[in-house]
Image: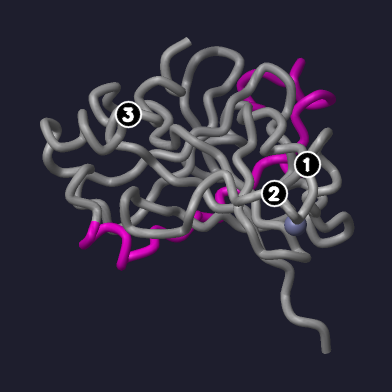
Amino acid sequence: MASPPPIPATPAPSSQRKRGRRESVGLFAIQCCDCQKWRTVPTKDEFETIRENLTEDPWFCSKRPNCSCEDPADIEYDNSRIWVIDRPNIPKPPPETERLAIIRRDLTAMDICYVLPNGQRAKSMADVQKFLDANPEYKDSLSVESFNFTLPKVVEETVSGGSAWRTNKQAKNQGKINASSSKK
Ligand SMILES: [Zn+2]
């Protein structure tokens, strides 16, 4: 039996915390199945595309233009930031929706919710069903199967070591790369 495919991880830098109950993930990364190095993924959309078919379509450095396994890793898997390990094969969010991963205040877990076309948030399949019942015109474009509330896993060791997350002043020094990448 082959080893399970490495799954994308989503480090959450401290710079995102002030934004409150918004997406907590500030940087996306994927591990090469071959060399095991971590490569950053520039956008959430691209990350969601990779994640969607990861088991069938494993990721390698060669999938990125001008990148090979010889190149140094973009990012190291260490406790300088909180890492969150995502699950493979989560469908891309349906049109007009956004899937948000929000870390809990105590940093023990993340919650998943979807922003629906009417701006409301769905925290469970029951919420999705309620929305579809109230707005049947969306039944064709938003199928219940496209929603997935599987929680990513917060890597505990990176939380206890992740002082940058807790101390904002420190974060300013340690989290420079994250801070700049999170500003548009
Ligand atoms: Zn590689």
Q: Front-most of 87 and 68?
A: 68
In magenta, the rendered stretch is: 132-161
Quadrant of the rendered image containing residue 170: top left
Name the residue: 79% across, 53% down: 59
In the rendered image of this protein, does residue 118 appear above or below residue 136?
above
Which numbered mark, 2 or 3, is in the foreground of this view? 2
> Alpha carbon of mark 1 to alpha carbon of mark 2: how far?
7 Å
Question: In this view of the protein, which residue sits in the foreground, 15 or 75?
Answer: 75
Mark 3 residue type: Lys
Image position, residue 121 (x, y; %)? 47, 27
158 relative to 128, above or below: below
Residue tagged 3: 176
* Residue nearer the viewer, 26 or 106: 26
Answer left or right for 5 relative to 80.
right
**Does 152 sit left or right of 140 as displayed?**
left
Spot the residue most to the right.
56
Q: Which mark is residue 71?
A: 2
The reply to whether dot 1 and dot 2 touch (C-beta < 8 Å) is yes
Q: Nearer the viewer, residue 87 or 144?
A: 87
SS at mark 2? loop
Quarter holding the N terminus is bottom right
Residue 67 is tagged as 1
Colour basis: one colour
